[in-house]
Amino acid sequence: MASEHVVVNCTINGENQVFLANERDSLLEALRDRIGLTGVKEGCNNGNCGACCVNMDGRIVNSCLVMAAECEGAQIRTVEGLADGDQLSPLQNAFLEQAALQCGICTPGFLVAAEALLEQNPDPTEHEIRYWLAGNLCRCTGYDKIIKAVQQAAGQSVV
Amino acid sequence: MVTAQSPETEQYNVIGTRPIRPDGVDKVTGAAQYGADLQLPGMLAGRVLRSPHAHANIKSIDTSKAEALDGVLAVVVNADFPRAADKDVDTGEGSANLKWVLDNVIASDKVLYKGHAVAAVAATDHHIAEDALELIEVEYDLLTPVLDVRDAMVDGSPLLHDSLHTSELDGSKSDSPSNTASHLQFTKGEIDAGFDEADVVIEREFETSMAHQGYIETHNGTAYWRADGTLDIYTSTQGAFPVRDQVSALMQLSQSQVKVTPMEIGGGFGGKIPVYLEPLAALLSQKTGRPVKLTMNREEVLLATGPTSGTYMRVRMGAKRDGTITAAEVHLAFEAGAYPGSPVGAGAMCSLAPYDIPNQKIDGYDVVVNKPKTAAYRAPGAPQAEFATESVLNELAEELGLDPLEMRLSNASVEGNTTAAGMPFGVIGNVDCMTAAQQSPHWQSELEGPDRGRGVAQGFWFNIGFESSAYGQVNGDGQVSLVLGSTDIGGTRASIAMQLAETLGIAAEDVHPQVVDTASVGFTQVTGGSRTTFAGGWAAYECAMDIRNQMAQRAAQIWEVDEDTVEYGDDAIIRGPADEDGNPREISFKDLAAQLPTSGGHIVGRADVNKTSSGPAFATHIVDVEVDRDTGKVEILRYTAVQDAGTAIHPAYVEGQMQGGVAQGVGMALNEEYYYDESGDLKNASLLDYRMPTALDLPMIETNIVEVPNPGHPYGVRGVGEVPIIPPAPAVRAAIANAIGVHMTELPMSPRAILEATTLGGD
């Protein structure tokens, strides 16, 4: 049962990172336990809740389903990379202004997923937002204010 | 979107506004530290071995191979704990027998549900801890599982606890042991005479499944047992003080030896009140001398924490032709899970509370079964009980050809009424919610299209008060540092700080709330019972009044005038008598704050409140659905939630509570269930198969906040968190009946259940 370790070189939030991963580590475990980026959350560890969403090479992935050893050379963006210093992104500001979080545990995953949506589709319909975010579970808000926050960040008028 | 309608809010400067929550930035940047995010020097990782069986005697546990594994530092079992006293402790949701609390944390001689903890391991790495679990050898002697509440109540059923006898409200106990832990009964009037007066009587039976709180953050607990015998606990909990009291009792430490730091919490809904991992982490830390962090995975959360009770319920209700309800009889049998303590009492007390029915008989049974020990879940007991009563009321209205809201209005509880459980109503917003729903654009609209239907239901929940503390330090910059003991699950730092700001006449942004550990603030009860904005806000109000008095005294001292001549105004200006030249003496809060250090020192305001009063909450919900007859899937087309908040302190977070409650209620109504096979194996212990609503399953949820201020609170607060989970299930059931003519009798009303009901021709 002894575990082997692997050296992984990748770029996380624009910084080069070299870390030693247990070969059994998921990307989620490596980000949290080896690198200290605990903004990435574990909700289910089997790809059903989206709390661990990160952007990997331009694609949204559940980091619990990616092995850390697979990340050699990858470009990874987490919730910690969304703000520019103390300047929050429009999406982060919209989440605050729309009260789109209650407990906040799902928020990092929603932010990363919604940012990728707006990059691909800057003016999504309500249905498109709901469809895109259906892989992210929130248990507190009933989603209403999350959808409105995405609409606000897209420059749409929010009722 | 309609918000605060009442002119009452116009008298306030801060209350009723929507400032950015103080903990917001940390929660959108990933900086907020939740329980599992904690790293301490030398920290070990722990994992828990759980029973694969629902009901078995433990013959032996051999941990030697696990202990021998490289990297494993300790393994603990129930026998390693101090022997728990056979006495009750406060668990934050009522009291429970300490031995049962320990046995639920880690099984002693018997496992009582699949997932029951049996042993715990601490290792240098969680992968090693997981490997070690496979090396622990447990010999079980299998017993027949008891999985249905009605089967469990039958004489001759296998018993979970040989020592359990049925308690009655008068304190008497049954002679022989039973799975029925308690029976309660509330009556009013003459039930038989009431039914004799009725022109129409409807009786229905219902079954509901266990359902989980479903918070996205799994449970965690970190402990550091220091060499001096003190114990630090860091955990995601709804109540740091109840955790302190339970852990100290279980570990046989004094309360002063245990300090609990509440980490940010990723949802709770009642399910993060019990202790699960904290005592295990404590013992593992004592054995290793190092900090130990335990976390659960999602399967463990579903198998071994929460949920709310599955039930069997029967309701009979009678009414006259004009809609006057003459009698109602309610029978509630609630699954407690493995140990006594279902919320059947609360369910019984809520079941008929929205209505002034002269003749009532309500029976409740708390029954143990081989399923996880139930925990509080948002208005515990009420969603089930009111599903049954509201459903029968809707059918009565249908039978009598009456508008269901009109029928509710003509029977509604009002000020001065008393429930069957003896609870008198003061100023309540029951009728106000029904009327607002009647006037809503939703109710006024026409619903068209095949297989579509509309339903409505009412909800009632008590809310509670109890102990909260708030300490506020006035800083030289004219701002206030506020320390609180209430875990902030949904914006209570904001809603409590706003009440302090309102009282002092300063801006919300000038108050800086922090949630602190149990050694740094006075006793504060759980964030639960919809109590936090109510009781925490009351503490903030009294804390601010203390600051106002001290500020006025200081001004008097500086001006060298009599204290009685100085007043702190609601505009945050302190005014004294005119000086010798006739000029007014006045100073702003900010200017005086700047002078505090040089005029006698800083000022700290303090309040510790214990409020036994509360502000009852009512809600009226309207839902439109469309039923797919081929798949049995129910789509929510439109939803409106009306609720009396008393006073909405931060309306955006009140709306959020209403919308979140609706989403959970819709989940309970349509999809969420605990699916056990006959051996007691939970077949859907993942978030793929335990199907909670996604963004795609819900429409926007229209909110209408009614404000009937609670006269028993300085700002009229009632508490808002719980009542919105109650009406969704009966409202959805009525909408389904309206759409396809089928009256469902079980929760969830899943595609399977709908297809079965429609294939069999419905009722």
Image (tube, rainbow, N blue to C red):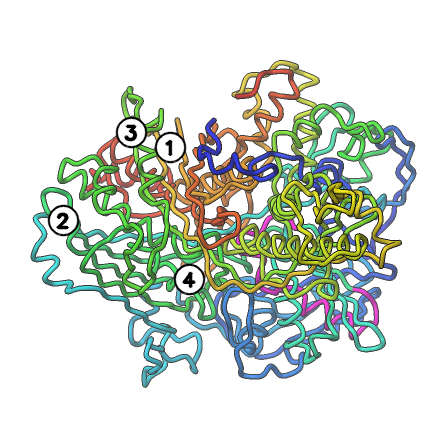
- Where disc 1 sits, the SS reads loop
Of all chains, the one bearing label 1 is B
* Residue B453 in the image, given as x and y percentages of width and height: 29, 29
Task: Give the mark, 3 or 4, whose residue is nearer the N terminus.
Answer: 4
Q: Do discs 3 and 4 belong to a common subunit? A: yes
Residue type at the position of mark 3: Gly
**Marks 4 and 1, how far apart in space?**
30 Å
The crowd level at tag 2 (other Cα within 10 Å; few <14, some 14-19, many 20+) is many
Q: Are the residues at dot 3 and dot 1 in contact (C-beta closer than 8 Å)?
A: no
**Marks 2 and 1, how far apart in space?**
33 Å
For disc 3, the marked residue is B453
The relative height of residue B742 versus residue B593 in the rendered view (above or below) is: above
Q: Is residue B692 left or right of residue B189?
A: right
In-front residue for pair A5/A19: A19
For disc 1, the marked residue is B633
Name the quarter where the C terminus of chain B is drawn.
top left
Q: Quadrant of residue B72?
A: bottom right
The crowd level at tag 1 (other Cα within 10 Å; few <14, some 14-19, many 20+) is some
Q: Is residue B413 left or right of residue B140?
A: left
**Marks 3 and 1, how far apart in space?**
14 Å
Q: Are the residues at dot 3 and dot 4 in contact (C-beta closer than 8 Å)?
A: no
